[in-house]
Image (cartoon, rainbow, N blue to C red):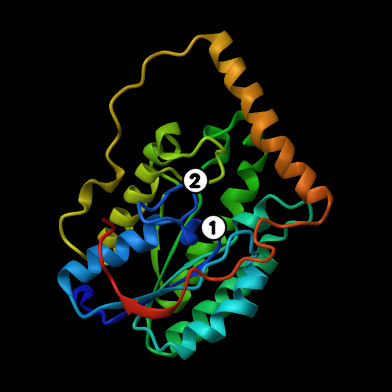
Amino acid sequence: MTDPGSFMRYVAIGDSLSEGLGDPSPSGGHRGWADRLAEILAARRPGLTYANLAVRGKSAAQIRAEQLGPALALKPDLVTVTAGMNDLVRSGFDAASVVADIEEMFVGLTASGARVAVMTFPDPGRISPLARRMLPRVVDLNARLRAAAERHGVTVLDVFPHPVTTDPRLWSADRLHTSPLGHARIASGMAHVLGLTGHGGWNDPLPPRPPVSALGAVRTEVRWVLGFLGPWLWRRLRGRSSGDGCSAKRPEPGPVTPPV
């Protein structure tokens, strides 16, 4: 297994999670867990270069078609992949088809000699009560993802078993994207499974939250439906994606500097 301190080029591919939505950068744009992981790696290997090809709203098939080739052309020795969430929320979801696209990425990336890492999905019903019916999809997708990763020697950050990953404080107000704290926890978790020391507490529980009244909980749900779910559904009905017109924020490898 590759020494995590020896990585020289890290490339992230995927969707909004890897792009960093929900984690504003002090210098503008989005930071996100992949940027944070790059900072952790660069602290141990100052010569590390990093590219991020992820684009919000992309399905697994789109990530494979649009990002796999460019990622391979950059000749990375570490690649992280996030794909499947945008498929999960679509009516025609097919776990086997989604994982087939992800596994094709595993095949190409591992064949190039890169270390590859992926993560599972948390229980959406613990993040938003209206998403409880998605649990069977998530369980199925996670199982297939773990099996594909095992077949190809891909490292897995398995977030599903850990209650803290559905703590509301790790999620943005839209409940679709992780908060800055959530991105920090993912970066630490990925560093941990890659073998970097000092990140074993990535899944530690947060302090208890103050109790919320039943009325307060209802108001929160109404605000979420009106402010986030409604606009998301309207966009889907019109056949539009949040990624329309967007491009990769960091298409070329460059040195890593912590945000000011």
How many residues crowd mark 2 within 10 Å: few (<14), some (14–19), many (20+)? many
Residue drawn at the location 71% of the way across and 57% of the way down? 241
Frontmost residue, 139 versus 66: 66
Number of marks drawn: 2
Secondary element at tag 1 = helix
Residue drawn at the location 35% of the way across and 42% of the way down? 181
Frontmost residue, 260 versus 131: 260
Specify which label sits upstream in the sequence, 1 or 2: 1
Mark identifier at residue 122: 2
Secondary element at tag 2 = loop
Rendered-image quadrant of the C terminus: bottom left
Answer left or right for 59 relative to 116: right
| Residue 229 point in image, percent of width and height | 69, 37
Residue type at mark 1: give it: Ser
Q: Circle 1 is placed at which residue position?
A: 16
Residue drawn at the location 40% of the way across and 63% of the way down? 156
Whether residue 50 is visible, yes or no, is yes
How many angstroms separate mark 1 from mark 2 (CA)?
16 Å
| Residue 222 point in image, percent of width and height | 66, 22
Classify 36 as above or below 217.
below
Residue drawn at the location 77% of the way across and 56% of the way down? 240
Image quarter of residue 188:
bottom left
Answer left or right for 58 relative to 153: right
Image quarter of residue 47:
bottom left
Q: Residue furthest right?
A: 238
Classify 129 as above or below 198.
above
Rendered-image quadrant of the N terminus: bottom left
| Residue 41 point in image, percent of width and height | 24, 68
Residue type at mark 2: give it: Pro
Frontmost residue, 239 versus 150: 239
